[in-house]
C-alpha cells in the first residue's frame, strides 16, 4: 500500500478517529500517526491498542509538522480546537473533520485556518452506538458512504489525497453541498435518533409510573430503539444544536405524517394504514438492495489479532524512539 501522508494528526481519537487510525496503521498509509485528546486515559488506551505512534494532550504539539490533521471530536468542539491549532498548521497541510453535521462545521472551522492550508470536510456515514478508542474497528467504513463537502475552490489535489485515504477504508465516496448534506442526514440519521431518544424516555417514564414491564418485553421492537438511544449524549447534543433548521423542518413533516396516521387509527381507516405500511416495506427493500442494511461490526476475530500484532510492533518502535 502507498504511503499517502508523512504525518497524520488526530484531534480526538474515539470511535471514528480510532477506526480510521486502525486502517492507516494496518495499511501503512502514513509514516507517523499522532493523536491528541482531553484525557490522558484516552491517549493511554489509544497507545496500548497500537494504532498511534505518539500521543499528546497538547493539540498544538500534535499538529506540528503534520501534513494531514483530522478533527474527530464532537462537533461542538471544532471551533475551539481549530482556533487553537490554526496558527500552528504547516503551510500546505490538509485539515479535515468527520462531523455528522456539515454547514455549521464548515462555518466553525474554515475562518480559523490560515491561507495555504486546505480544508476538506468529510462525514463517514458509519458508526455504532459505542464511544472511545477501544470501540473502533478497521472494517467500520467498509461498504459505507463517506460524504465530502469541500468549499468551492478547494484544491483538487488536496481533495484527491483525502479521497485516497478514505478509499483505503473500503468506503464509497460522494461529494455534496453542506446544506444538502444536513437535510439528507436530518431525516436519515438525526431525526431517527431523536425518535429513539424520545420513545425510550417515554417508556422509561411509563415504567416508573405504572410499573409496566417495558424492559422485560423489550424484544418486541423497543430493543432496536434502545440500541440507537445508547449513543453518546454529548455527540448527539452537538448534532442537534448544529443542525437545528434541517432537523426542525423534518420534525415538522413528521408531526404532519404522524397526525395522518393518528387520524387513520381513530377513524378505523384500515386501507390508509395498509397503504402507509406497504411503503415501509418498499423502502426497506431499497435499503437492502443498496446493501446498507447490515449493521456495522468488526469483520472477524482475526481483525483483533492483527491489532494485537500492530500493538507489539508499534510499542517496540516507540520504545526504541524514546
Ligand atoms: P467519541 O468516541 O466520543 O470520541 C471523541 C473523541 O474526542 C475522544 O477522543 C475525546 O477525548 C475527544 N474530545 C472530546 N472533546 C475534545 C476537545 N475539546 N478537545 C480534544 N479532544 C476532545 O466520539 P466519536 O463517535 O468518535 O465521534 C467523533 C465525531 O465523529 C463527532 O463529530 C461525530 O459527529 C462524528 N461521527 C460519529 C459517528 C458515530 O456513529 N459515532 C458517525 C459519523 C460521524 P477524551 O476521551 O479525552 O474526552
Image (cartoon, rainbow, N blue to C red):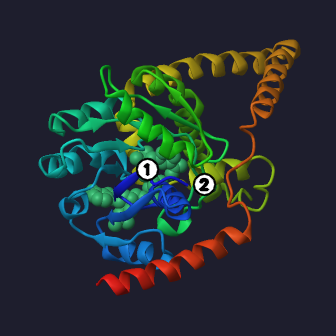
Tally of numbered tags: 2
Where does the image place residue 14, in percent across and percent down from the top left? 44, 61
Q: Is residue 204 above or below residue 321?
A: above
Viewer-nearest residue: 137 or 230: 137
Q: Is residue 232 visible?
A: no
The reply, left or right, for residue 229 in relation to residue 212 is left
Disc 2 marks which residue?
204
Where does the image place residue 140, in percent across and percent down from the top left? 61, 53
Residue drawn where x is 59% and y is 16% of the image:
256
Residue drawn where x is 27% and y is 55% of the image:
66
Residue drawn where x is 61% and y is 49% of the image:
228
Viewer-nearest residue: 68 or 84: 68
Characterize the local packing of mark 1: few (<14), some (14-19) or many (20 or more) Cα atoms within 10 angstroms. some
The reply, left or right, for residue 65 in relation to residue 190 is left
Q: Residue furthest front?
A: 2
Under tag 2, what secondary structure? helix
Name the quadrant of the C terminus.
bottom left
- The image quarter in which residue 106 lies: top left
Between discs 2 and 1, the one toward the N terminus: 1
Q: Is residue 95 visible?
A: yes
The reply, left or right, for residue 31 in relation to residue 189 is left
The reply, left or right, for residue 91 in relation to residue 266 is left
Residue drawn where x is 39% and y is 62% of the image:
31
CB atoms of marks 2 and 1 within 8 Å:
no
Mark closer to the observer (2, 1): 1
Name the quadrant of the N terminus.
bottom right
Quadrant hosting ligand 1:
bottom left
Viewer-nearest residue: 228 or 9: 9
| Marking on residue 74 | none
Characterize the local packing of mark 2: few (<14), some (14-19) or many (20 or more) Cα atoms within 10 angstroms. some
Cα gap from disc 2 to disc 1, whole angstroms: 49 Å
Disc 1 marks which residue?
4
Amino acid at each position: 500500500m502507498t504511503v499517502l501522508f508523512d504525518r497524520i494528526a488526530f484531534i480526538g481519537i474515539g470511535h471514528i478517529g480510532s477506526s480510521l487510525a486502525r486502517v492507516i496503521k494496518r495499511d501503512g498509509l502514513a509514516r507517523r500517526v499522532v493523536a491528541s485528546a482531553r484525557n490522558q486515559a484516552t491517549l493511554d488506551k489509544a497507545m496500548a491498542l497500537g494504532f498511534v505512534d505518539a500521543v499528546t494532550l497538547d493539540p498544538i504539539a500534535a499538529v506540528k509538522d503534520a501534513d494531514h490533521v483530522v478533527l474527530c471530536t464532537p462537533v461542538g468542539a471544532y471551533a475551539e480546537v481549530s482556533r487553537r491549532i490554526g496558527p500552528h498548521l504547516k503551510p500546505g497541510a490538509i485539515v479535515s473533520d468527520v462531523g455528522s453535521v456539515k454547514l455549521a462545521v464548515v462555518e466553525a472551522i474554515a475562518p480559523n485556518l490560515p491561507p495555504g492550508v486546505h480544508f476538506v470536510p468529510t462525514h463517514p456515514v458509519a458508526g455504532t452506538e459505542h464511544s472511545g478508542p477501544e470501540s473502533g474497528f478497521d472494517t467500520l467504513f467498509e461498504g459505507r458512504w463517506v460524504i465530502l463537502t469541500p468549499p468551492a475552490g478547494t484544491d483538487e489535489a488536496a481533495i484527491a489525497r483525502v479521497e485516497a485515504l478514505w478509499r483505503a477504508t473500503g468506503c464509497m465516496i460522494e461529494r455534496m453541498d453542506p446544506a444538502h448534506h444536513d437535510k439528507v442526514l436530518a431525516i436519515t440519521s438525526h431525526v431517527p435518533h431523536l425518535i429513539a431518544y424520545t420513545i425510550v424516555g417515554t417508556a422509561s417514564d411509563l415504567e416508573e409510573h405504572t410499573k409496566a414491564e417495558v424492559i422485560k418485553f423489550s424484544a418486541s421492537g423497543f430493543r432496536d430503539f434502545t440500541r440507537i438511544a445508547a449513543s453518546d449524549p454529548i455527540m448527539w447534543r452537538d448534532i442537534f444544536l448544529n443542525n437545528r433548521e434541517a432537523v426542525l423542518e423534518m420534525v415538522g413533516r413528521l408531526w404532519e405524517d404522524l397526525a395522518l396516521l393518528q387520524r387513520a387509527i381513530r377513524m378505523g381507516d384500515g386501507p390508509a394504514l395498509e397503504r402507509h405500511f406497504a411503503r415501509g416495506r418498499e423502502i426497506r427493500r431499497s435499503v437492502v438492495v443498496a446493501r446498507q442494511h447490515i449493521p456495522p461490526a468488526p469483520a472477524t476475530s482475526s481483525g483483533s489479532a492483527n491489532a494485537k500484532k500492530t500493538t507489539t510492533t508499534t510499542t517496540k518502535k516507540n520504545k526504541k524512539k524514546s
